[in-house]
Image (cartoon, coloured by chain):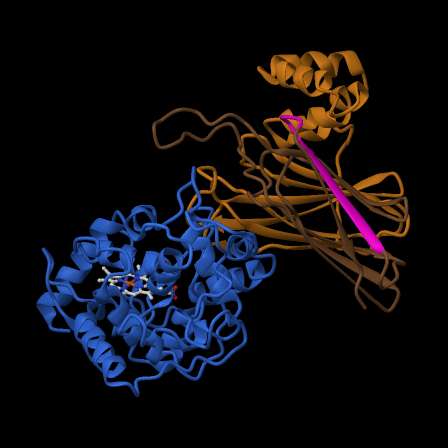
Amino acid sequence: MNTSNVKKLILLLALATSGAVVAAEGDVSDSDRIAQYREMISDGNPADFDEMRGEELWKTAGGPKLATLEKCDLGKGAGVVKGAYAELPRYFKDTNKVQDLESRLLTCMSTLQGSSAEAIAAQPFSTEKKPSDISSLATYVAGQSKGIKMAVSVKHPREKEAFEIGKRIFNYRAGPYDFACSTCHATSNVRIRMQDLPNFNIRKDAQAAYTSWPAYRVSQGLTRSFQWRLNDCFRQQRFPEPKFASEATIDLTMFLAVSANGAAFAGPGLKR
Amino acid sequence: MNINMDRRKVLKAGGSAGLLALFASVGLISPALAEGDRKAFFAKSMDEALSLMGVIVPENSDAIKLTVPEIAENGAVVPVSVVSTLPRVEQISIFVDKNPNVLAANFFMPGGTESMITTRVKMGQTANVIALVKADGKFYRASREVKVTAGGCGG
Amino acid sequence: MGNPMKIRAAVKDGVTEVKILMQHEMETGMRKDADGALVPAWFITDVKAQYQGRTVLEAQFGQSISKNPYLVFRFQGGAAGEKLTVSWVDNKGDKRSDEATITA
């Protein structure tokens, strides 16, 4: 990062957090205390309820065709949920696309159940008043990969291409502050308020970050999907919010998922 | 302790009488409970809560292990664990001294139930979490401060 | 009727450890919603856990217990394969009761 960018970063962070910004070095003790807090709340994750809701939705006939999603092919064959998330995103022959979990769920909900993809994409995230079905389904499917090692392939040329584009998007600077994801996520020991920002150039950081989503956000009292996480970071970056399950988000997810390869999937997580 | 006087105090606490009546009218809890044990939940300070619970001055005790995080990243969820080695524990109560209502929960341990409890409380700001343990008819306490970086009363 | 709880109960060396996660908003009555309107108080007031007709824990909650309340406690006895029941009531009169089978 060059100096002018560092200045801009600090300015933005200050704006975002009313003055409380630190690029801390040496001050490990607060991080340790936060780690202690996270450890203490890790048991009893309310994301379990979203998983239960998603499982129910998966197995209940719905949509105009009154079908369940139990025949949905998430990449490991029709109906195979276990371990599917650990290999997503991937290339799908039937759609001739690289798809992440949520875009694949959209495909299944429209082909199997006859639901309109536009209608589903219109409420892709839960709100305090209304849970989102596709978000709960994503929590359920992801939860079925708990403990399974991330093994996302880039063997297919389309997968390789998605990875490369995702990497470029990660480093692509634009917007009113000329920021990229990498502005905040490619340097160690950068913090906003109390949050240590993960450095995706460091395998261990990338793994920990990616494998803990979807996650229950304590501050919102809701379980959030990875698509939501990306949307929120586009917002932090002062970019327009991407379209739900759009190619850009899938490519970016591909890049981040591959960076997490080798680590056991640990989600759904629990975050501040 | 004079029950009538306590009741007046509760009425004065404002709004609480209506809520008590509501509890009693839907038959959720017996009127005895509504007027008795639950009144401390409306207390606005530690002193008021303790006096409503009939506690004189609880002794600090090393036999109570109160585990809370030093820093809570979000006040909406602050984990609290209380373990006591005092003999014959009947009740464990948890307070947050700067919350609008200081008493968070009462736990009643019948014989055969171990004297420990883990739960999660909301904290609006940096405050003390206090564990009150009733053992063999006497009250003991332990207290620890938790720094809250984002208040939890927004939910 | 409230939403289901998640209850895990495991016995080890004659002591059963119970972990309960309840689904409840636990509104304090002091929070404002997005439109600035006060959200009415709505919280669990009483919880009871029973094993073979014996009460093993009773609790009273106030507004300061977190959304989706979590409890861990232990009682002596309890046998693998036997059932434990947990029930709650809230200040609106809603109730919920769930069972869990104790595991070894």
Please state the extent of the stretch shown in magenta in the rendering.
Answer: C83-93
Q: Is residue B63 visible?
A: no
Report the side of B123 relative to C89 (left or right): left
Q: Which chain is blue?
A: A
Left or right: residue A96 compared with residue B84: left
- Asked whether A116 falls inside the magenta stretch, the response is no
Residue C91: percent from left, percent from top = 64, 27
Assess whether residue C84 is covered by the magenta stretch: yes
Q: Which chain is brown?
A: C
Q: Colour of chain B?
A: orange
Check the image and report above or below for A145 versus C89. below
Q: What residue lies at 47% left-to-right and 71% top-to-bottom?
A: A78
Q: Residue A123: x, y in percent?
A: 34, 46
Q: Percent position (x, y) of residue A56?
A: 56, 53
Asked whether residue C26 appears in the rendered view, the answer is yes
Q: Residue furthest bottom?
A: A155
